[in-house]
Image (cartoon, rainbow, N blue to C red):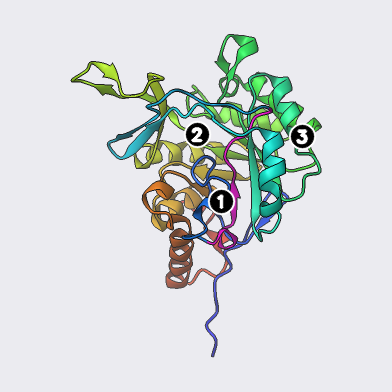
Amino acid sequence: MKRMEPDLSISLGPLKLKNPVIAASGTFGYGDEYLEMVDPNLLGGIVLKGVSIRPREGNAPPRIVETPSGMLNAIGLENIGVEQLIRDKIPWLETLDTVVIANIYGHSISEYGEVASALKGVRGIHALEVNISCPNVEMGGMVFGTDPGVAARVTETVLKNTDKPVIVKLSPNVTDIAEVARAVESAGAHSISLINTLTGMSIDVERRRPHLANISGGLSGPAIRPVAVYMVYQVTRSVRIPVVGIGGIMDARDALEFLIAGATAVQVGTANFINPRATVDIIEGLRQYCLQKGIWRLVELVGSLRT
């Protein structure tokens, strides 16, 4: 008799994913870089490296430093620009049998709209993830995601300029992340992803200089996971739209923490640098957990925390 297999599929707003494991932006390139180790078609989805309206060189090196249980990065949003993305990357991305999400950003609200508009109607891109952790040059460098009103305006602008589902990626560097989540939900976001990196700094004590040329950077990895799990828990109890959990997920048990806390899906980032097969290992781990527990639909785990 054939053994019954658990159903790992989930719905992320209008998106249907074969499983809840998504490769996070900036850690999986455009998917083709990992082909020798990972078949991207096995994943629930991939989020592409962040893209802006024009190419960007990013910050001067050094741009990455290892920290206890994590890493700091100050890449500076280096990217090829949306025109080259469409010309050079989309033809291959169109061949994939998985959800492909473009991560977009801008330094003004209108720039977000321009990138969204450029990707309108582009086959091979199934959704947009809006990075609102960028400095707003029109408002003195304030990050879009720290002000609920501004975050809502960015969301509205993207929605007006796209034909794709919109996921808004939240910054943890705020006083009340649930307030920002409610603002982007009210503005029409289809789902929310969190958390982006925490701001941090590391110093070379011999040279008495920052390890990063940019001085500060974004902290990711296992060190931030408890913060991320708690913020996901807060947000899922404040909004009705689906939430994607991100932050220090290294294995299936880490992913399960987010799902049980209320996340519908998860993104795997830093783990890809340590174990290029982390995403597929996590999918298999989720399958094994469901088999062991007699859970036949993974969605039954979502928000199942007992308090």
Per the image, the residue denoted by label 1 is: 265
Describe residue 30's horizontal placement relative to residue 155 as left or right: left
Image position, residue 75 (x, y; %): 47, 29
In the rendered view, tell whether residue 281 sits above or below residue 62. below
Q: Is mark 3 on a helix, strand or loop?
A: helix
Residues rendered magenta in the picture: 39-53
Q: Label 2, label 3: how many angstroms apart (C-alpha)?
A: 24 Å
Residue type at mark 3 is: Ala
Q: What element carries label 1?
A: strand
In the rendered view, tell whether residue 47 sits above or below residue 287. above
Per the image, the residue denoted by label 2 is: 196
The image's mark for residue 141 is none
Residue type at mark 1 is: Ala
Residue type at mark 2 is: Asn
In the rendered view, tell whether residue 177 sits above or below residue 5. above
Callout 2: 10 Å neighbours few (<14), some, many (20+)? many
Identify the image quadrant of the N terminus. bottom right
Callout 3: 10 Å neighbours few (<14), some, many (20+)? some
Q: Label 1, label 2: how many angstroms apart (C-alpha)?
A: 15 Å
* In the image, farthest residue toward the bottom: 1
Image position, residue 253 (x, y; %): 39, 56
- Nearer to me, 85 or 70: 85
In the rendered view, tell whether residue 42 sits above or below residue 64. below
Image position, residue 245 (x, y; %): 51, 44
The image's mark for residue 118 is 3
Name the N-terminal-most of marks 2 and 3: 3
